[in-house]
Image (cartoon, helix red, strand yellow):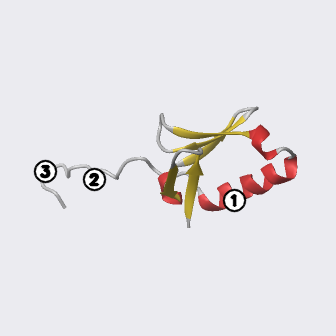
């Protein structure tokens, strides 16, 4: 399953895994791709609360807070790797 964005001139498809977290302002839903980048969706695009609530439920099911980096293993006291 992928997310598809269209603007009349182009089409962008991305896997759900591309989005790291969800944030909201009073007027916007933000699908965060990292610490700085996000796809911005105006809440007014949904018209009423029911479609927006359904969209929130979909986002919560598909996007969980994901780490943006990779785990780093500390060196052992002797300096040798495990």
**Percent coordinates x, y for residue 34 in the rendering:** 47, 42
> Which residue corresponds to the image point at 79% horizontal and 49% vertical from the top-left?
52
Tag 1, which secondary structure? helix
Residue farthest bottom in this picture: 1
Mark 2 burial class by Cα count in 10 Å: few <14, some 14-19, many 20+: few
Q: Relative to 9, is 57 on the left or the right?
A: right
**Percent coordinates x, y for residue 75 in the rendering:** 20, 50
What quarter of the picture does the N terminus occupy? Answer: bottom right
Task: Quote the CA–CA distance across marks 1 and 2.
Answer: 35 Å
Mark toward the viewer: 1 or 2: 1
Q: Which mark is residue 73?
A: 2
Circle nearer the N terminus (3, 2): 2
Which residue is identified by label 1? 58
Contact, CB < 8 Å: mark 1 with mark 3? no
Viewer-side residue, 25 vs 65: 25
Mark toward the viewer: 3 or 2: 2
Mark 1 burial class by Cα count in 10 Å: few <14, some 14-19, many 20+: few
Viewer-side residue, 11 vs 37: 11
Mark toward the viewer: 1 or 3: 1
Q: Which mark is residue 78?
A: 3
Tag 3, which secondary structure? loop
> Which residue corresponds to the image point at 13% horizontal and 49% vertical from the top-left?
79
> Which residue corresponds to the image point at 37% horizontal and 48% vertical from the top-left?
69
**Percent coordinates x, y for residue 17 in the rendering:** 49, 58
């Amino acid at each position: 399953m992928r997310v598809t964005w269209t603007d009349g001139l182009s089409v962008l498809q991305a896997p759900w895994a591309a989005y790291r977290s969800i944030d909201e302002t009073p007027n916007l839903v933000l699908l965060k791709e990292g610490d700085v980048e996000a796809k911005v969706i105006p809440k007014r695009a949904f018209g009423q609360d029911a479609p927006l609530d359904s969209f929130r439920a979909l986002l919560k099911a598909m996007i969980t807070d994901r780490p943006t980096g990779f785990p780093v293993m500390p060196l052992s006291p002797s300096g040798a790797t495990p």
